[in-house]
Image (cartoon, rainbow, N blue to C red):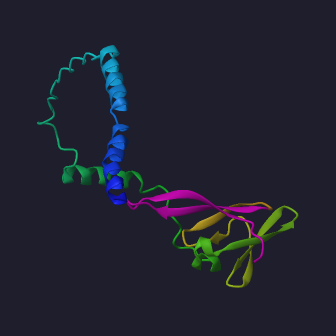
Amino acid sequence: MMRSRRMKGLPLLLLAALGGCGDNDQLEVTQWMSDVKRDTKIVVRKIDEPKKFTPFVYGAVDAVDPYNPIKLSVALAKMQAKSNGALKPNLERRREVLEDYPLDTLRMVGTLQKPGLSYALVLVDKAVFRIKVGNYVGQNFGMVTKVTETEMELKEIVQDASGEWTERQAKLELQGSK
């Protein structure tokens, strides 16, 4: 009998619990959405007119092709003729010892001073060499142009992609011993 009373009260309890899950919150949300739709003004900005497209007319159809191989070879011949008396290394002179080493393997480790003459001390392969203005170093015909207490400046002569000789500046800076 006790059991039957409990069973009769259970459906009532469930109905009361579900009754608390009313749609009061849903009504508030629905009301808010209606208010927002009513109060919000839709603004559509006018799109600018498209710019008028004017096609480009290529007028150089009958002109000479700038990449014509004959024209390029003539221009290259003119450039070489102009540079014949220009800069080039002296290949007849006797090469110096430090010209066998790339410039990045040479380390300036000090200087020596004599009245009117400065020497840079350069370390390569555990040997120290005295270098003065006029000596050649490195594999690019680098001639020493200036020696100071902190660096040695060079003028190298190298070939560019077209085969012409050009000058470029380089320098070795004083480095501490390792």
Q: Position of residue 131 (x, y in %)?
A: 73, 71
Q: Quadrant of the N terminus?
A: bottom left
x and y, in percent, of residue 145 in the image: 68, 60
Q: Residue furthest left?
A: 62
Q: Which residues are magenta?
A: 150-178
Q: Nearer the viewer, residue 164 or 105?
A: 105
Q: At 36% across and 41% down in the image, what residue appears?
A: 16
- Whether residue 104 appears in magenta in the rendering, the answer is no
Q: Residue sitting at 60 percent across and 71 percent down? A: 103
Q: Residue at x 27, y 17 (%)?
A: 44
Please tell me whether residue 62 is drawn above or below residue 99 in the rendered image.
Answer: above
* Helix, strand or loop: magenta stretch: strand
34 lies above or below 22:
above
Q: Residue furthest bottom?
A: 126
Q: Position of residue 164 (x, y in %)?
A: 42, 59
Taking depth in this image into account, of 67 and 83 the one nearest to the observer is: 67
In the image, 25 versus 7, the foreground residue is 7
Query: Is residue 175 highlighted in magenta?
Result: yes
Give the image quarter of residue 101. bottom right
Left or right side of 43 for 90: right
27 horizontally vs 118: left or right: left
Q: How many marks?
A: 0
Q: Classify the position of the C terminus by image quarter.
A: bottom right
User: Percent from the top left, x then y, of residue 140?
Assistant: 54, 68
Question: In the displayed image of the protein, which residue is found farthest to the right?
Answer: 115
Q: Residue at x 32, y 43 (%)?
A: 15
13 and 145: which one is in front? Answer: 13
